[in-house]
Image (tube, helix red, strand yellow):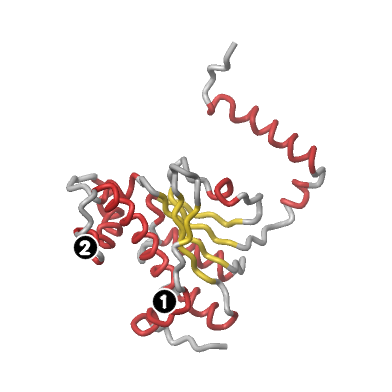
Amino acid sequence: MKDQSSLYERALANNKKWIAEKRATNKDFFKHLAEGQSPEVLYIGCSDSRATAEDLMGAQPGQVFVHRNIANVVGGADLNSLSVIEFAIGHLHVKHVVVCGHYYCGGVKAAMQAKDLGVLNPWLRYIRDVYRIHQKELDAISDEDQRYRRLVELNVQEQCINVIKTAVVQKTFLRTGAPVVHGWVFDVRTGELIDLKIDFENELKHIREIYDLGFEKG
């Protein structure tokens, strides 16, 4: 008989199976896991249930430090995302920061609608600001689906810029040459990760013309 129980009801049993699978391939897996973490990548993604960081990247526990929120936003006043960035770079010493959006993002779609969404309004304003900055390009796209996809890409690019504005990125990169900031989009229809090829050093140079925090190369 087919199991009709919900994922929630199966979760603890699934956990036991996962533990057994890990121990079967590496008896010291959890011993090593408990010794600490040294991730190479900070991944800032969307909370969408279809876009899980480790699965997309084929990563194992301990390799990726993950922060997710609606529409992968890095808000200048969002202490949550800023604290994650500070900790990942300043204390875990990640070498790469990835901002990853995805096509058909509900948060981006909501920001394109003329609708009062209550407490979501100030959060979606970050994305609407992206539309305002790029309005000429976006309004010139007649196909609504293509305009939607393009806004997803532009939102990733702008959130990368917001990461680059932070003191910990500027200071650490100028001193050590890392981390490098990347922008990706996950295509939910194909499973592909698309690199938007952010020119990080050029963007950093441009950002520092206005957002220079006084740091010099070490």
> What residue is pinned by disc 1?
203
> What residue is pinned by disc 2?
135
Which of the image's four quarters has the N terminus? top right
Q: In the image, is 200 to the left or to the right of 22?
A: left
Query: Residue 68: x and y, percent?
Result: 46, 52
Which of the image's four quarters has the C terminus? bottom right
Q: Amino acid at mark 1?
A: Glu
Alpha carbons under labels 2 and 1: distance apart: 21 Å
Instruction: Identify the residue at image location x=50%, y=65%.
Output: 85
Q: In the image, is 199 to the left or to the right of 4?
A: left
Query: Residue 209: x and y, percent?
Result: 36, 85
Instruction: Identify the residue at image location x=64%, y=56%.
Output: 63
Q: Amino acid at mark 2?
A: Gln
Up the image or down, 212 lies above or below 59; here it is: below
Up the image or down, 173 lies above or below 85; here it is: below
N-term-proximal mark, 2 vs 1: 2
Q: In the image, is 216 to the left or to the right of 17?
A: left
For the image, the number of numbered tags is 2
